[in-house]
Image (cartoon, rainbow, N blue to C red):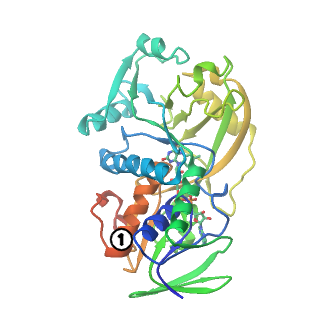
Amino acid sequence: MTYDVIVLGLGAMGSAAAQHLAERGKRVLGIEQFTSPHDKGSSHGGSRMIRQAYFESPEYIPLVLRAYELWRRLEKDAGTRLLHITGGLNIGSGDGQLVKRTIAASTQHSIPFAVLEGRAITARFPEVFPLAGDVAVHETNAGYLYPEECIRAQLARALHAGAELKFEESVLAWSSERDDVEVRTAKGTYRAGRLVITAGPWANQALDGIIPLRVTRQVMAWIQPKTGVMPFLPDRFPVFLLEDPGAGAHGYGFPAIDGPEGGMKVAIHGSADLCTPENVNREIHAHDLQRIVEQLRIRIPALDGEVLRAQTCMYTMSPDEHFVIGVHPQFASCSIACGFSGHGFKFANVVGEILADLAITGSTSHPIGLFSPLRFCA
Ligand SMILES: Cc1cc2nc3c(=O)[nH]c(=O)nc-3n(C[C@H](O)[C@H](O)[C@H](O)COP(=O)(O)OP(=O)(O)OC[C@H]3O[C@@H](n4cnc5c(N)ncnc54)[C@H](O)[C@@H]3O)c2cc1C
C-alpha cells in the first residue's frame, strides 16, 4: 500500500504529527523503533513544564498560546486531564537575563504576571529563600503536562482517525525523489508521497548529520522535601525556574505532583555531558545528584532532602538552542522537526499541526521563521 505521509519516530512530535495528518484525512503510516511512550528518548519522566512567559524569545509565544488551545482540545477528545495550571515562578537577579527577558516577553504579548521582590517572595512562598538582589516573576498560567499521557492521547487520536502505527520497527534507511518517498525497515519497505522526520535524539542518524545537533545526558531527581511535602503540593506551590548566579545553568522543578510519598522532580537545565542515544550512561552517580541538590537548595533549602529516585533523559541541542522545523533543505517531499534543545515538549501538539501543514501544502501560517533548518546549511 502507498501512504500519503510516513512519520518516522512516534515520540512527542511524531505522535502529534500523525494525529494532525490523520485528522485531516491523510493516509498516515507512523513507524517507531520502540513502543511509545517509552523511557529511552526525550519525553519521559512524568512531567513537563508549560509556560507562556517565554524568556527564550517572544517569538515562541503565539505558538505556545496555540499549544494551550490544542492541549485543552486533546483533553476533551481523549477524555483525560493532561495540563495542570499551578502558576510558575522564575527567580533570578533583578539584573539577570531570566528575569529581564521574562518580563519583556510577557509585556510584549500581554501574558499575565506579577513581580515579587525581597520579603514579598517569602511572604507568598515561605519555602523560598531569595538571594540578595533576587526578583521573582510569577506567571499565572504556567503549569505542567503529563508527557506520557499526552503521547498516549495523541497516538490514540491518530489511530481513531485512521492512522496505521507500527511499533518496535526501526527505520534503517529512507530515500526521496520528488513525490515518492521510500522508507526501509528491518520488516519491510514502505512508500509515500511525503516523509516527516521526528527522530528526537536520533535525528543525527535519521538526517545524516545535515543539522549540527548535540545530544546531552540530563538527570532528573525526585527529592522528598526536608520540611514535608504539604507546602509543596501543586495547589500551593508552582513550577519554578531558578537562575544560577554563576554558571548560567538554571535549576528547575515541579511541585509535589505525585502525592505525599512521591517527592518533587528537580533538575538542571544547562551544561551537560555529550552523548549519543547508543552510548548514553543511564546509571546515576552520586555527583549527578550532588550537583542538582547543591544548585536547588540555594534558594529552596527544603530540597536538601532524601533523593527518592533519579533517571536520565536526553536533550537534542541545536547550536542556537532554537528549534529546527521546516522542509528538509535537500528534499522537498520531506519535513523535519528536531533540535528542541530541552524545551520542546509543551509545543508538541502545535509542532504536529505545523508538520501536517508542511507535509500537505509545503508551508504553514504559523510563525516558524526562527526555526528554519536553512540557518545551519551553508
Ligand atoms: C529531562 C528533560 C526535561 C525536559 N523538560 C521539559 C519541560 O519542562 N518542558 C518542555 O517543554 N520540554 C522539556 N524537555 C524537552 C522535551 O521533552 C523534548 O523537546 C521533546 O520531548 C522532544 O520530543 P521528540 O519527539 O523530538 O523526541 P522523542 O519524544 O524522543 O521522540 C523521538 C522518537 O523517534 C523514535 N525514533 C528515532 N529514530 C528512529 C528510527 N530510525 N526508527 C524508528 N523510530 C525512531 C524514537 O524511538 C523516539 O520515540 C525536557 C527534556 C528532558 C530530557
Residue depicted at x 54% and y 44%: 271
Residue depicted at x 51% and y 49%: 342
Pointer 1 residue: 358
Is there any visible trace of residue 378 in the rendered image? no
Q: What is the x, y in percent for residue 201?
A: 57, 61
Between residues 368 and 207, which one lies in front from this camera angle?
368
Q: What is the x, y in percent for residue 262?
A: 69, 32
* Above or below 172: residue 17: above
* Above or below 369: residue 272: above
Is there any visible trace of residue 13 in the rendered image? yes
Mark 1 C-beta to ligand 1 under 8 Å: no
Residue depicted at x 53% and y 41%: 269
Quarter in which the C terminus is drawn: bottom left
Q: What is the x, y in percent for residue 142?
A: 43, 35
* Above or below 153: residue 137: above
The quarter of the picture where residue 231 lies is top right
